[in-house]
Amino acid sequence: MSAIEPEDESGKDRSADPDALMRNFERLGYIADRSLATSIFLITKLRKPLLIEGHAGLGKTEVAKVLATMLGTELIRLQCYEGLDASSAVYEWNYQKQLLAIKIQEGAAQTVEEKERYIFSREFLLERPLLKSILAQEASPVLLIDEIDRADEAFEAFLLELLSDFQISIPEMGTIQATHIPYVILTSNRTRELSDALKRRCLYHWIDYPTFEKEMRIVRTRLPDIEEELSKQMVRYVQALRKLDMEKPPGVAETLDCVQAVALLGKHQLSADVIEETMGCVAKSMEDGARLRAAGIDQLLSQAT
Amino acid sequence: MRQEHAQQLAGSIVDFCRFLRTHGFSADMRQTMTALEAAKTIEVRNPQFFASALQTTLCSTMEEWEQFPPLFQTFWGESQPRPRSTSGEYKGPSRGESPEQKEGSSLFLDRPGKQTGAAEGNTKAVYGASTQQRLKKVDFSQLPCDDLALLEEISLRLLRRMSQRLSRRLAISERPTRIDLRRSIRRNITRGGEPLVLAYKGKKPRKNKLVILLDISGSMNFYSLFLVRFAYALQARFERVHTFLFSTNVVDISDLLRTRYLPEALRKLSQRAAGWSGGTRIGESLRQFNQVYGRKLLSRDSIFIILSDGWDTGEPELLASQLRKTKARVQKVLWLNPLLGLKDYQPLTRGMAAALPYVDVFAPAHNLESLLALERQL
């Protein structure tokens, strides 16, 4: 079955099918399963935004970074927060510079219209991430909109417009249409429900905690210098922790931190002491620490070794 | 030949979307189109690619994501990227299943898996409780409405109070808080750019949304009428108020309360049988509310008000877990309890005790003064 190829503007490392993409990701140090690979593959083919949801520390943001590296294109990141508005997400005029320019022009024999056109030219435009992604000249950039659930609903609505038309209008300059439509990845930690309209425009992927085998592969890929046996014990230990009813169960990022911590402490074996010493890597609140203790360190140890 | 095959596949995908919809997925036109496009770009004969592609295009929440694999399996059979029919006509398991799916008490209970058991249990329990429902038709219009003016006055005060919450987005304002350079330059451009007139921006006011759940069960008989009118007064003043009645289940009455003339509203209200003076199942009602309206109505700028005495015949655990869910979505949970006006009242009923940890403000609501005191809480 032949694929509908969007014009291949980058000419770079385009993967022919999800499996090839999976291998490319692995080469770059990211272990993706087939399902995630298919989702990412479809972004590159369908040019639809991908919404990735999942708990913290499971590599949501990393997907965008690796995708950008693989495509050999620029990564533009927009970190969302409450109160994020157009002037910090889209564009803003460089007012100070404009004021100076007005002063300098004072004596010049130009009409007001000419002066105005000069003041509102590209030179005075501060490009924020969203505008930058639209203006990209050489190739489609990867636009990462991180933690969209933290932004206000009003911003979400604005984003909706941008994601369907990929154009931004600046009253003083006119409408700017994207020459290269960016690959868009949105991430969310599900602190609130996103609007249905936004979700329906996106492809969706839910990243869950990895299986033992997958997590082992991640640890082996990321930290190849750690002994395999120790890695195995650590992964089993973290996997056991996730079954406790913790407020913030440890993600893969925590596993990696913890394995590294153990290695730095010069330990070759998981023990009760090691668990005690590295507790801060996996239990990130007092309550979670207490839960870990309540579950019994010896109990966890026996599950891991 | 190939063309024909592709068409057949497209037909099956559309059928599959329809099948998903009967299971509570949104799977709308846009998503269906995306799924069709996706099927064109990947190797559909690889069952894993095919399943993943449909999953990523047709799901939009974690819940849907997790329900997807078994549904996919049911529809497409043994990982075959086409249904088991050879003719164009589709005779999959979905047609067979859908009628019994629809038989359930509501479409929202149609979640397969672990929820089903609980849902069935609840449905039965609801029937059990509804024998107690007397479905009395009350004619409120006979009652005096002379304190309405006062109620309106209170709601007006509440409104002023609540409007003071400012959102963090910045908007143009005349008061000098922060200079809006953009506007300043625009205003002064005709003066050669000399900044003579400055424009300012401040916090943009944004009114909170009110969601009111009003208990109309038997134990609330004395108060429910009075409180309905309070809700009416609020509704007249706030732009965004949603009012619901509950006893054993939830009824939306926002549209009724939006009527101009109160006696008219009350007359219509009494026609909408909603289990007046029936039994109380707060937990179950709240579950229904969360499921049906929660996602649409609750957001971080909403204030959630429950007007109830906390006498609950249902499971306190259900109440607690549902209230926790609600609390996670809203800014504030208020529980107004008319009994709190009684001198020796202690919130010891099982339901009330279970709910208290998730309530931000627990206040009386038995007369006008108590409602007035609410002003300070908001």
Image: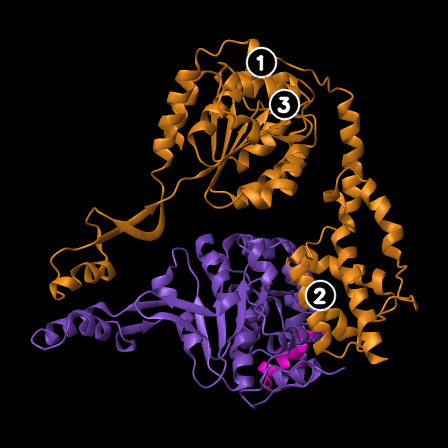
Chain colours: A purple, B orange
Q: Nearer the viewer, residue B188 or B319?
A: B188
The residue under the point 78% across, 37% down is B105
Quadrant assignment for the N terminus of chain B:
bottom right
Mark 3 neighbour class, 10 Å CA radius: few under 14, some 14 to 19, many 20 or more: many
- Where does the magenta region start and end? A212-228
* Disc 1 target residue: B140
Q: Residue furthest left?
A: A107
Locate the C terminus of chain B and report the quarter of the image it occupies.
top left
- Residue drawn at x 66%, y 33% as measured from the top left: B285
Q: Is tag 3's residue or tag 1's residue first in the polypeptide sequence?
A: 1
Instruction: Name the amino acid type tagged 3.
Output: Trp
Query: Which label's residue is closer to the chain start, 2 or 3?
Result: 2
Magenta stretch, overall SS? helix
A102 or A111: nearer the eye? A111
Residue B7 or residue A160, whichever sits in front: B7
Label number found at residue B55 = 2
Q: Can residue A282 be seen here?
A: yes
Q: Secondary structure at mark 2?
A: helix
Residue at label 3? B311
Looking at the image, tell me whether mark 1 or mark 2 is earlier in sequence order: 2
Q: Tell me which chain the residue with mark 2 is part of.
A: B
**Amino acid found under the numbered disc labelled 2:** Gln
